[in-house]
Image (cartoon, rainbow, N blue to C red):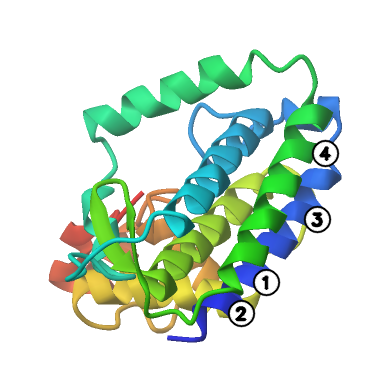
Amino acid sequence: MANPTSVLEVAYSDLIALVEKLDDDAAWRPTGCAGWAARDLVFHLLGDAQRALVALGTPATGPADVDAVTYWRAWRPGDPDADLSRRNTRIMASVWSGIRPLADLYAETARAVLVHARRFEGDELVATQGHTLTVGDLLATLAVEAGVHQLDLTAHLPGPPPAPPVLRLVRDVLDGLIGRPVAQDWDDAHYVRAGTGRTPLTAAERESLGPAAELFPVFG
């Protein structure tokens, strides 16, 4: 995989640029996350950046129990806890009267994550969400989430897709979870949407994937 610090720099910088352009009208537009408007997604992104800061400040003893790929095995679509989290996010995001304070806090927090990330070599162990993993693997998971949510944010709003290194990282994770490269004739963005349940597989795609189709969505 590519250097996770560099990929996270690209992923977070692009997301910050998109979020900083949101106005209150755009913040109510739907996203690629079912049931979430853009403001809900920004609140979720803020929570992920805050978690990143906590993780980078939480050293752990080994061994690591997940890596940049296996971390995602717990995040399967349809999990009751995930459904509850989505509802809670919608409720908490609605407390903000306008998008600007929320967007500004997200941008400030995400930039702080990048500053702290540069201070690590990458092989130090940290803890997050009950797991131990290296800083490099943590940063890779953050970049993956940022890339998926950039696709979500631009599903109904103008903006560029995630940068190629970010999409490539998500593709590598999907392939790793499946156990082999699949859908090599798909472009990265389509693979990411299908692999995370944003886009349903067509009958032709299921046939071409064979048994691997039963693993979709791979995570979400």
Callouts 2 and 4 close, C-beta under 8 Å: no
Could you tell me how far apart the alpha carbons at marks 2 and 4 are, in whole angstroms? 25 Å
Q: Earlier in the sequence, mark 3 or mark 2?
A: 2
Q: Earlier in the sequence, mark 1 or mark 3?
A: 1
Q: Secondary structure at mark 1?
A: helix
Q: Quadrant of residue 208?
A: bottom left
Three-letter code, disc 4: Leu
Three-letter code, disc 2: Ser
Q: Earlier in the sequence, mark 2 or mark 4?
A: 2
Above or below for 95 versus 1 = above
Let me know if residue 139 appears in the view.
Answer: yes
Above or below for 53 versus 41 = below
Q: Secondary structure at mark 3?
A: helix
Disc number placed over residue 6 in the picture, else none: 2
* Residue drawn at (73%, 31%) of the image: 102
Q: Quadrant of residue 73?
A: bottom left
Could you tell me how far apart the alpha carbons at marks 1 and 3 are, in whole angstroms? 11 Å
Could you tell me how far apart the alpha carbons at marks 1 and 2 are, in whole angstroms? 7 Å
User: Residue 79, how many percent across, how many down?
Assistant: 23, 35
Left or right of 96, for residue 70: left
User: Residue 133, how many percent across, how many down?
Assistant: 29, 66
In the rendered image, which residue does mark 4 sit on? 22
In the rendered image, which residue does mark 1 sit on? 10
Q: Quadrant of residue 165?
A: bottom right
Could you tell me how far apart the alpha carbons at marks 3 and 2 are, in whole angstroms? 17 Å
Disc number placed over residue 17 in the picture, else none: 3
